[in-house]
Amino acid sequence: MSNDLGIDIRNLAASGPGLAFIVYPEAISRTLPIPQLWSVLFFFMLFTLGLDSELGQYIFSLMDTFGGGIGVLLIATFELIALHWVYGVRRFSDDLKFMIGYSPSMFWKVCWVFIAPVSLIVLFVYSAFVWENPTYNGVEYPDWGIALGWFLAAISVGMIPLVFVLTFLKMLFTGKIRNLFKPASNWGPGCPEARKMLLASHANFDMNETKYGIDNPAMDSRYYAQ
């Protein structure tokens, strides 16, 4: 877009919600059929946003600040830990090899296991250290607005520990607590033929498939051959 308009990218658009008035219309005009119709609908939607609430822009900015800030860093950190530490980076690499035909290099494994989680944690700590309450056009949000923002952030992040606790209690009361630390027995490709091929490729790791789950070979010491 910067090249087509002959404008320096630094002067193309301001950051924040203002991008919607430049980037979205340009994307609509270039990618969708009948761009005139979609452009009219898009700007009509923006017009109705202003009619819905006198505080619409303030609420939108508040959600943009709290919904895509610290919460995203925490969610990404939990995803990396669950996938590459709990599920196992070696098993994840085997799954990728099965899908794309080759195993990721050691560089990517180190990034997934160490560099990415540490970087996200550092960014989270730094963001919390330099955090300041958001403002819009120099206007500070009231206390109830800040509380609403933190509530929105807690909804997205809080689902992770909430689901874990509920699942833990369910497994605890049913006597299946060990299944929390195993991939489900039905985990794998939906295609029966592909699933058989995947299980065959893992057969040499003695997966010990049971009624409720299978052992995670990433935790098997025999996997780490010296």
Image: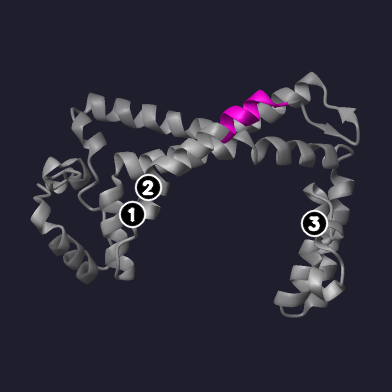
> Which residue lies at the image location 66% right of the left edge and 27% below the top edge?
150
Task: Work out whether 148 lies above or below 59.
Answer: above
The percent coordinates of residue 13 (x first, y second) are 84, 57
- The amino acid pointed to by label 1 is Met
Is residue 64 found left or right of 136 in the rendered image?
Answer: left
- The amino acid pointed to by label 2 is Val
Q: Quadrant of residue 27?
A: bottom right
- Magenta stretch containing residue 136, yes or no? no
220 or 140, which is in the foreground?
220
At mark 1, the secondary structure is helix
The percent coordinates of residue 35 (x first, y second) are 78, 76
Q: Which residue is mark 1?
A: 106
Distance from label 2 to label 1 (Cα)? Answer: 6 Å
Distance from label 3 to label 1 (Cα)? Answer: 40 Å
At mark 2, the secondary structure is helix
- Magenta stretch containing residue 130, yes or no? yes
Q: Quadrant of residue 8?
A: bottom right
- Using the rendered image of the protein, determine whether residue 36 is visible from the camera's viewpoint: yes
64 or 148, which is in the foreground?
64
> Which residue lies at the image location 28% right of the left edge and 59% below the top edge?
95
Q: Which mark is residue 110?
A: 2
Q: Quadrant of residue 46?
A: bottom right
Q: Residue furthest top?
A: 143
Q: Which residues are magenta?
A: 123-131
> Which residue lies at the image location 30% right of the left edge and 53% below the top edge?
92
Q: Residue furthest bottom?
A: 34
- The amino acid pointed to by label 3 is Ala
Q: Which mark is residue 20?
A: 3
